[in-house]
Each structure stands twice: as C-alpha cells, then as structure tokens.
Image: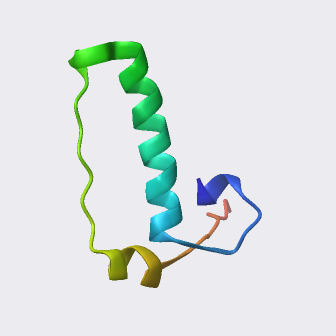
Amino acid sequence: MCLNSEKRYTTLGSELDFVRAYLNLQQKRMGNKLQFSLHMEAATESNCLLIRWKAVHV
C-alpha cells in the first residue's frame, strides 16, 4: 500500500491493516475456501517503519 501512496514512511502495522482488509474481502468472496491468520507482536506493528523507495530506470 505504501508504494501507491505519496507518503515517504509508513508503519508495518498500517501495511498489515491493508493486508487484513484485502484478505477479509477475499474471504467473503471465497467462503470457507480461504482461511488465514496473521500474527505480529504489538510492539513490532507500531515500531517498525517502512520507507518507500522508487526504482530508477537508466
């Protein structure tokens, strides 16, 4: 999600929220065919910053 944003930084927790929302949507579509669980320590979720970068083509 961070790659599609103008923000320079985001937290791992924010990215994980996006993944949860996407998987919940897919689970509604697929029913019992899709089961998932995501686990992360709370401190990691809020303390881990992700930096957005762009590849430069030469």
Image coords of residue 27 (percent x, y): 36, 24
Q: Which residue is drawn at 23% across and 45% down?
A: 37
Left or right of 30 on screen, residue 37: left
Q: In which quarter of the image is residue 58?
A: bottom right
Left or right of 7 on screen, residue 51: left
The residue at the point 69 percent across, 74 percent down is 8
Vertical arrangement, residue 9 with respect to residue 39, above or below: below
Please say if 12 is above or below 1. below
x then y, percent, for residue 46: 45, 78
- Left/right placement of residue 33 relative to residue 23 reads left
Choose between 57 and 47: the one closer to the eye: 47
> Which residue sits at x=73%, y=69%?
7
- Of all residues, the one furthest to the right in this rendering is 6
Name the image colouring.
Answer: rainbow
Give the camera-side residue of 9 and 43. 43
Query: Residue shown at 44%/47% (left/top)?
Result: 19
The tally of labels here is 0
| Image position of 21 with respect to 14: above or below | above
State which quadrant residue 33 falls in. top left
| Percent position of residue 5, x then y | 72, 58
